[in-house]
């Protein structure tokens, strides 16, 4: 199903934080953007707690995040869901991919991958992961499988054959090894997944589910039509599109929001010490987030209440972001 068909369905958006700590300024921007987009489309707004990476989760952070959202006037339209309760859905999806020949077991450790690249004279760029070299794509060679990977190369070849002679989709085109898609804010995007990432992980060696598979399964199961999230996640989109195609589920529309950066110029995140939101004055925190999104500041000297401020920004969002109805 194409994005155009998916857009004809009733709008469903979501905010999907990881409970690795309380919300910070950057995560509030993503939360506000997803909430405003849902309200601008008169749709449904969901919250999903992405807690599959259990070693990184902080006890109680999920409840704290929900409280922080509520204090900012953002309450989900349905009960929140936790990824940690949804393992059977992920297993079913992996079983489907294996049965279709789109996934295979992998015995490689990170050192194995680094050694394979070093043997070819490749070095790792700062903050960049080394693409998987395909070592186990054609068999384990007597080693024990540790993880499961999506066979990008094989799937793209099969897709190219299936699309031969057919009119290309307006929103996802596989041509010259590039996967292209349209972002509602960033415009036309493209990535050679094979070259940039390689065959990516679906289930990790420690048994935990990978983000890419979990998010695709959850978005499809919850009927999400529009994904609004931070720009740092844009490079995940092509992997997720490939999985959507392989699993036969609709592709949402995507909008990636501006990032909040720290003093060092890098994305503000919990990993680099981002401070928890000070919500003693939630309206001020929301106003700061709205400015990052290019929305008008609150009128001075008498600021409105939170609900009135959100109403103001919904109207501005309709004007600024792709003419939401």
Image: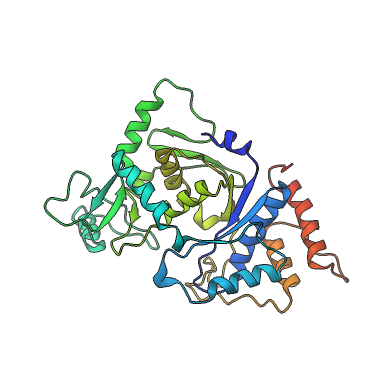
Q: Is residue 24 above or below residue 254?
A: below
x 82%, y 68%: residue: 305
Q: Is residue 23 visible?
A: no
Q: Residue furthest top?
A: 165
x 51%, y 76%: residue: 273
x 52%, y 69%: residue: 269
Q: Residue furthest left?
A: 142
Q: Is residue 126 above or below residue 67?
A: above
Residue 298 occupies quadrant = bottom right
Q: Is residue 166 visible?
A: yes
Q: Look at the image and tell me in which quarter the C terminus lies.
A: top right
Measured as percent of width and height from the top left, residue 291 is found at 71, 62
Measured as percent of width and height from the top left, residue 197 is found at 35, 50
Q: Is residue 96 left or right of residue 232?
A: left
Q: Residue furthest right?
A: 302
Measured as percent of width and height from the top left, residue 66 is found at 61, 69
Q: Nearer the viewer, residue 26 or 310?
A: 310
Residue 119 occupies quadrant = bottom left
Q: Nearer the viewer, residue 38 or 294?
A: 38
Q: How many marks?
A: 0
Q: Is residue 93 above or below residue 82?
A: above
Measured as percent of width and height from the top left, residue 300 is found at 86, 68
Q: Is residue 52 left or right of residue 12?
A: left
Applied colour scheme:
rainbow
Q: Nearer the viewer, residue 118 or 272?
A: 272
Q: Is residue 47 left or right of residue 123?
A: right
x 54%, y 31%: residue: 170
């Amino acid at each position: 199903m194409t994005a155009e068909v998916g857009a004809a369905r009733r709008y469903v958006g979501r905010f999907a934080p990881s409970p690795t700590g309380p919300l910070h300024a950057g995560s509030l921007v993503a939360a506000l953007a997803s909430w405003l987009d849902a309200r601008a489309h008169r749709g449904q707004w969901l919250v999903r707690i992405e807690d599959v990476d259990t070693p990184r989760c902080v006890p109680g952070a999920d409840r704290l995040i929900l409280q922080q959202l509520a204090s900012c006037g953002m309450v989900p339209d349905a009960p929140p869901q936790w990824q940690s309760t949804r393992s059977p859905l992920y297993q079913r999806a992996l079983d489907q991919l294996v049965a279709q020949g789109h996934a295979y077991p992998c015995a490689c450790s990170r050192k194995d991958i680094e050694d394979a690249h070093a043997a070819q004279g490749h070095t790792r760029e700062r903050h960049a992961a080394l693409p998987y070299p395909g070592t186990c794509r054609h068999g384990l060679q007597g080693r024990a499988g540790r993880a499961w990977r999506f066979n990008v190369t094989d799937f793209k070849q099969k897709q190219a054959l299936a699309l031969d002679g057919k009119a290309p989709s307006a929103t996802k085109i596989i041509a010259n090894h590039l996967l292209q898609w349209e972002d509602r804010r960033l415009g036309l995007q493209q990535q050679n997944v094979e070259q940039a990432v390689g065959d990516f992980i679906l289930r990790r060696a420690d048994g935990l589910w990978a983000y890419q598979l979990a998010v695709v399964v959850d978005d499809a199961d919850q009927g999400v039509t529009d994904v609004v999230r931070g720009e740092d996640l844009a490079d995940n989109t092509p992997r997720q599109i490939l999985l959507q195609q392989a699993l036969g589920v609709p592709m949402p529309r995507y909008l990636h929001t501006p990032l909040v950066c720290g003093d060092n110029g890098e994305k503000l995140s919990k990993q680099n010490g981002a401070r928890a939101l000070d919500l003693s004055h939630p309206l001020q925190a929301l106003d700061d987030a709205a400015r990052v999104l290019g929305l008008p500041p609150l009128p001075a000297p008498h600021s409105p209440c939170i609900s009135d401020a959100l109403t103001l920004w919904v109207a501005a969002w309709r004007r600024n972001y792709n003419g939401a109805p």
